[in-house]
Image (cartoon, rainbow, N blue to C red):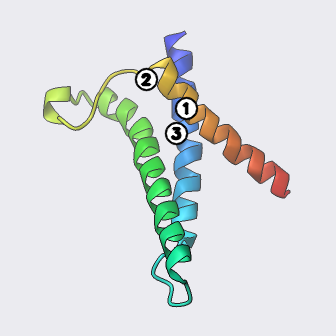
Amino acid sequence: MNSTIQTLHFIGGFIVLAEALNKLERTNPCACSLDARERVTEWLKALAWLLLAIGAGGALATPVLLLCGVQSAEAPLLRLEPPTIAETAVLLGFATLIVRTRIKEG
């Protein structure tokens, strides 16, 4: 069961990271043509995708770091433990929304 959760967590993290990087590349909060409201909206969108990219990157990096033998004391900002069901559910929820949107777009 635990390896299934870890695998699903990794897959969800990969999908979310790929989409977050794609969205970040297309976000331009410093564009000259934006009014104040649009600029704030773009900055919030960029921040949201950045945070999702960081979280998804952690989902991909943690198993690799664990395999390399990195300990939590060596990386104090990382929680180098297997994912919880809650973390996996959140990542898979975002991944499902992303895949659904891609299928809907055709």
Residue bearing mark 1: 90
Horizontal and vertical percent for residue 19?
Answer: 59, 54
Residue bearing mark 2: 83
At x 50%, y 56%, the residue is 49
Quadrant including the C terminus: bottom right
Q: Amino acid at mark 1?
A: Val
Considering every residue shown, the one lying at the far left of the view is 73
**Secondary structure type for disc 3:** helix
**Secondary structure type for disc 2:** loop
Q: Nearer the viewer, residue 45 or 68?
A: 45
At x 42%, y 50%, the residue is 51
Q: Is residue 1 above or below residue 92?
A: above
Quadrant including the N terminus: top right
| Number of other residues with Cα within 10 Å of mark 1, as a class: few under 14, some 14 to 19, many 20 or more | some
**Going by the image, does 77 lie left or right of 92?**
left
Q: Mark 3 to mark 1: distance in Å? A: 10 Å
Residue bearing mark 3: 13
Horizontal and vertical percent for residue 3?
Answer: 51, 16
Horizontal and vertical percent for residue 17?
Answer: 52, 49
Q: Is residue 61 above or below residue 20?
A: above
Q: Amino acid at mark 3?
A: Gly
Q: Mark 2 to mark 1: distance in Å? A: 11 Å
Circles 2 and 1 in contact, beta carbons < 8 Å: no
Q: Is residue 27 above or below residue 102?
A: below
N-terminal-most mark, 3 or 1: 3
Q: Amino acid at mark 2?
A: Pro
